[in-house]
Amino acid sequence: MSKILNCVVLVVSLLIPLNSIIAESQPNVVLIFIDDMGWEDFSCFGNRDATTEHIDRMANEGIRFEQFYVNSPICSPSRAAITTGQYPQRWKINSYLASRELNKTRGVANWLD
């Protein structure tokens, strides 16, 4: 029994530094998911009426995605798709989420299971 315990302690003690090395080498990811935004709403994409200094700095220091696809033009299904990695229809979220009564009459789930 003590040999097994020693092996477990040895493995755990070896994994702790390995986890910190892996965590340091992984990239930081910031996903900005905004509803009802136009292409040129950020100044880094051409807006001359409003400045978005912090977003512009993030775009300059990181990756700016300029071509993309979205699973739905409506907020709730898009969020379900990005959260699950699946089509929102699989989760019965094919329209915006409203009150529970309205969701029931439209056949829309109230939340992700």
Image (cartoon, grey):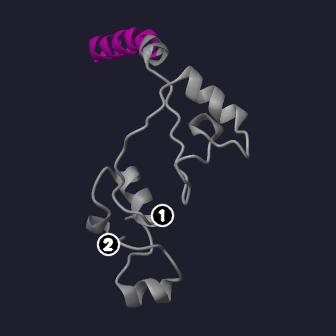
Q: Decide whether residue 10 is among the magenta residues.
A: yes
Location of mark 2 (residue): 92
Q: Would you place residue 21 above or below residue 55 in this image?
A: above
| Cα distance between the residues tagged 2 and 1 | 14 Å
Q: Nearer the viewer, residue 15 or 92?
A: 92
Q: Nearer the viewer, residue 48 or 25?
A: 48
Q: Earlier in the sequence, mark 2 or mark 1?
A: 1
Quadrant (top left, top right, bottom left, bottom right) of the N terminus: top left
Mark drawn on residue 6: none
Q: In the image, which residues are magenta?
A: 1-19
Quarter location, residue 14: top left
Question: Of tags 2 and 1, which is closer to the observer?
Answer: 1
Quarter location, residue 12: top left
Mark drawn on residue 75: 1
Q: Decide whether residue 37 is among the magenta residues.
A: no
Mark 2 is surrounded, within 10 Å at the Cα level, by few (under 14), some (14 to 19) or many (20 or more) other residues, namely some
**Residue 51, percent across and down?**
73, 39
Q: Would you place residue 11 above or below residue 50 in this image?
A: above
